Image (tube, grey):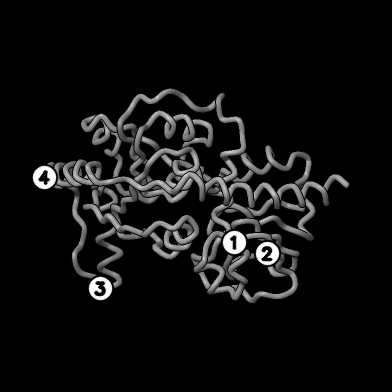
């Protein structure tokens, strides 16, 4: 069976959790035989899934494309949330949560470290591309700057060093929640896919709050965006961010940091983890029998 996940050439924490986590939980299981694929962490269920293989869905969710045609080549062990189940016509009993929750079952002592920051800010690749001054903003606020492009173990260490994580990246929130670190969602460019957040949050009984903050732009990105908007005849062209823009975004981040963070209930998280452990046990029996 082949492990199926999205591979970002720059690296992306949520996607890169797949080989890191599954090879620890299911050692010597995956190979290059793509007659069957294992679809785990990520928003992977859509029309882009290869048609031919048998697809083992293990905690993934729908999004980023058209709904796939569900047939007998889909085996649903678990899905991420109730929206995925509803849209795909999967029984709600198959809903657990995002399977990255299983990071709780791994020995993380070598990768985590003591608290050093009250707040951390984790950014998506899009935000890092649009503006390169985020670290300076974090330094001015004494926030821990965290890039989704860093390797899994570095990101785990940086998240663990924070008392509260402010994050654009959903898997930043998922892992923080799993590690019992309160978190706050933010969105700087209005390009967060609310469906996937609502899907995951439905499984842990929390609401989706959209904290839309001011966008910031490098000069080169400003030119690119202006050209795109000119071609597509869109208004409100972004501009190279001024000191006032940067200060406004900084103050908005400060305001968000003073709001009440989110954290799922301990008992619920333990129950969801146990459900996944039961599924893993069954899979291991099939593998190693």
Earlier-in-chain disc, 4 versus 3: 3
Q: Residues within 10 Å of mark 1 (few under 14, many from 20)?
A: many
Tell me which residue sits at (56%, 24%) in the image. 110
Relative to 150, is 279 on the left or the right? right
Q: Residues within 10 Å of mark 2 (few under 14, many from 20)?
A: some
The numbered dot on residue 233 is 3
Tell me which residue sits at (54%, 53%) in the image. 98
Q: Which of these two is toward me, 3 or 278?
A: 278
Q: Which of these two is toward me, 243 or 99?
A: 99
Examine the rendering and report whether any part of residue 10 can be seen: no
Earlier-in-chain disc, 3 versus 2: 2
Which residue has dot 1 on it? 79
How far is disc 2 from disc 4 in space, using C-alphas?
50 Å
Please, what secondary structure does the residue beneath circle 3 have? loop
**Which dot, 1 or 3, sits closer to the camera?**
1
Circles 3 and 2: CB distance less than 8 Å?
A: no
- Position of residue 261 measured from the top left corner of the image (x, y, whole percent): 32, 45
Earlier-in-chain disc, 2 versus 4: 2
Q: Which of these two is toward me, 141 or 247?
A: 141
**Which dot, 2 or 4, sits closer to the camera?**
2
Which residue has dot 4 on it? 244
Which residue has dot 2 on it? 76
Q: Residues within 10 Å of mark 3 (few under 14, many from 20)?
A: few
**Which dot, 4 or 3, sits closer to the camera?**
4
The numbered dot on residue 262 is none
Circles 1 and 3: CB distance less than 8 Å?
A: no
Quadrant of the rendered structure where residue 97 is?
bottom right
How far is disc 1 from disc 3 in space, using C-alphas?
39 Å
Q: Residue furthest left?
A: 244
């Amino acid at each position: 069976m082949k492990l199926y996940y999205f591979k970002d050439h720059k690296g992306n924490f949520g996607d890169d959790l797949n080989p890191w986590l599954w090879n620890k939980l299911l050692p010597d299981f995956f190979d290059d035989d793509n007659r069957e694929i294992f679809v785990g962490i990520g928003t992977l269920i859509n029309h882009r899934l290869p048609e031919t293989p048998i697809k083992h869905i293990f905690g993934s969710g729908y999004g980023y494309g058209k709904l796939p045609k569900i047939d007998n080549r889909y085996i649903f062990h678990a899905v991420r949330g109730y929206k995925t189940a509803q849209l795909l016509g999967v029984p709600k009993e198959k809903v657990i949560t995002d399977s990255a929750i299983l990071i709780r079952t791994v020995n993380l002592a070598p990768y985590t470290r003591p608290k050093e920051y009250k707040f951390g800010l984790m950014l998506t690749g899009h935000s890092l591309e649009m503006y390169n001054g985020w670290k300076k903003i974090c330094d001015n606020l004494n926030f821990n700057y965290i890039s989704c492009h860093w390797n899994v173990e570095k990101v785990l260490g940086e998240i663990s060093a924070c008392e509260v994580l402010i994050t654009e990246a959903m898997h930043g929130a998922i892992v923080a929640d799993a590690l019992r670190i309160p978190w706050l969602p933010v969105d700087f460019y209005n390009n967060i896919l609310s469906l996937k957040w609502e899907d995951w949050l439905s499984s842990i009984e929390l609401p989706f709050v959209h904290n839309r903050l001011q966008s910031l732009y490098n000069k080169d990105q400003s030119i690119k965006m202006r050209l795109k908007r000119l071609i597509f005849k869109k208004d409100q062209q972004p501009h190279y961010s001024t000191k006032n823009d940067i200060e406004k975004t900084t103050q908005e981040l400060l305001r968000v940091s003073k709001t009440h963070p989110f954290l799922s209930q301990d008992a619920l998280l333990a129950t969801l983890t146990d459900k996944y452990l039961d599924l893993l046990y069954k899979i291991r029996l099939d593998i190693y029998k």
